[in-house]
Amino acid sequence: MVWLLVPIFIVMGMWGGQHIKGLRRFGIPGLAVTWAVGKDIKDKKARWRHYLLSLLSFLLAMGYGENSFYMKVFKKDWLVRIMYGLTLAIPFLIIDWRVGVASCILLPSAWSLRLGKFIIYTNKEGKTFDWLWDDFARYTTLGCLIAFVV
């Protein structure tokens, strides 16, 4: 059942990247925590670990673009993307070390992709919504990792 959230995470990530930033920054972690905590978990330690997914709000809000902290420190785009992916892996490392190790490989790889795009929608003001294949890969990866830990 949790796998039904993955397409929702993909849409939130892709739409949030281009239009409504809060969907990506707060929607993905908020939905993940709500789903995880909403499960009937008797083990308080396991329930507490799910709250760590809320760290993704801070991490997703940091960004990795031209004006980001990462760009100021690492200077090269490819290195920024790798470091950003590794930073996103932190909550997964704390929640479950096996998923965390996988996320240390998958997230930097997904954030390093450059796959192209096509326009799917243009509104009356000329603003477009692009289908970015690299965003699709990023948020599919992130969504699957979240599904593994909840």
Image (cartoon, grey):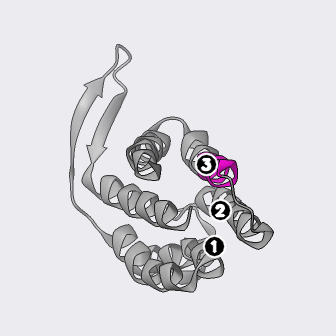
Q: Which residue lies under the disc numbered 2?
A: 53
Whole-number angstrom distance, CA of label 1 to CA of label 3: 16 Å
Question: Label 1 sits on what residue type?
Answer: Pro
Q: Is residue 71 left or right of residue 125?
A: right
Q: Which label is found at residue 91?
A: 1
SS class of the residue under badge 3? helix
Whole-number angstrom distance, CA of label 2 to CA of label 3: 11 Å
Pointers 1 and 3 in contact (C-beta within 8 Å) = no
SS class of the residue under badge 2? helix
Q: Which label is found at residue 71?
A: none
Mark 1: few, some, or many residues within 10 Å (few <14, many ≥20)? Answer: many
Q: Nearer the viewer, residue 23 or 4?
A: 4
Residue with the most extreme top position:
124
Most common secondary structure along the magenta stretch: helix
Q: Which residues are magenta?
A: 29-39
Q: Which residue lies under the disc numbered 3?
A: 35
